[in-house]
């Protein structure tokens, strides 16, 4: 009993250490002082890249959300990674620029390779990577860009997970591990990446993430 209690106490202490620096997006002060605001044309610089494989249902919803954003988006690129459903046709019909993923080189994972190709094809200076199953509020992209503009650092967002099946609750454990690892790396709640395989200003977003 004492061992269980000790483990619980240790877990609580560890949680405080790992998570206390991990902020929510709404916690970021998006009101930038005038003397620090950068001359940055959001709509002319943002390329959104969506790696997708058999995502016909999710892609329809995400592209619909992107059409309702409060700012203009320079381009939306969908990288079709070997889909066998209507993913490619839906991407084209809803206005996304379609790229068919080339054969994956040795040592690459599927999604990483799809993101790499999308990043190389993008014409914007700022890259935003979104999973196809992400949903966005009308101000979602605007908040991400303002947070990036304020800090000049990577902005990586862990989205709210809407559970449809009871078995999906098991993912809580792995999500907590990921958030804790990010919390350990955070400096004032933000992660700075000095090098990127894609030599552009990048916003990785598995859920939503930005890099400079």
Image (spheres, rainbow, N blue to C red):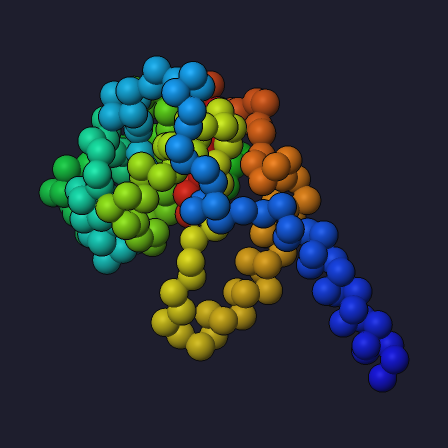
* Residue 71 or residue 91, whichever sits in front: 71
In which quadrant will I find the N terminus?
A: bottom right
Q: Picture quarter containing residue 191?
A: top right
* Residue 148 or residue 110, whichever sits in front: 148
Can residue 203 be seen at all in this image of the molecule?
no
Q: Picture quarter containing residue 129?
A: top left
In the rendered structure, the answer to whether residue 85 lies left or right of residue 40 reads: left
Residue drawn at (29%, 25%) of the image: 42
Furthest residue toward bottom: 1
Q: Residue 145: x percent and y percent?
A: 37, 32
Residue 160 to residue 167: above or below: above
Furthest residue toward left: 93
Residue 162 to residue 132: above or below: below
Residue 30 to residue 212: above or below: below
Q: Picture quarter containing residue 66?
A: top left
Residue drawn at (64%, 35%) of the image: 187
Q: Residue 170: x percent and y percent?
A: 54, 70
Residue drawn at (52%, 65%) of the image: 171
Q: Residue 24: x percent and y percent?
A: 49, 49
Can residue 161 be seen at all in this image of the molecule?
yes
Residue drawn at (44%, 77%) of the image: 166
* Residue 136 or residue 75, whichever sits in front: 136
């Amino acid at each position: 009993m004492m061992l269980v209690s000790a483990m619980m106490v240790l877990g609580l202490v560890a949680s405080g250490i790992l998570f206390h620096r991990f902020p929510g997006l709404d916690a970021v002060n998006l009101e930038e002082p005038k003397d620090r605001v950068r001359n940055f044309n959001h709509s002319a610089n943002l390329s959104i890249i969506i790696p997708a494989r058999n995502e016909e249902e999710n892609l329809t919803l995400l592209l619909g959300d992107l059409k309702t954003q409060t700012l203009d988006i320079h381009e939306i690129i969908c990288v079709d990674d070997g889909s066998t459903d209507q993913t490619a046709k839906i991407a084209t019909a809803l206005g996304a620029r379609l790229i068919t993923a080339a054969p994956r080189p040795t040592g690459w994972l599927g999604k990483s390779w799809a993101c790499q190709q999308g990043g190389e094809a993008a014409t914007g200076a700022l890259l935003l990577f979104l999973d196809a199953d992400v949903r966005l509020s009308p101000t979602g992209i605007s908040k991400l860009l303002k947070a990036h503009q304020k800090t000049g650092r990577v902005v990586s967002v862990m989205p709210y997970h809407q559970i449809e099946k009871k078995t999906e609750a098991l993912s809580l454990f792995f999500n907590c591990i990921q958030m804790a690892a990010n919390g350990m790396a955070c400096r004032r709640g933000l992660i700075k990446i000095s090098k990127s395989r894609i030599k552009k200003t990048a916003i990785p977003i598995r859920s939503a993430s930005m890099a400079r």
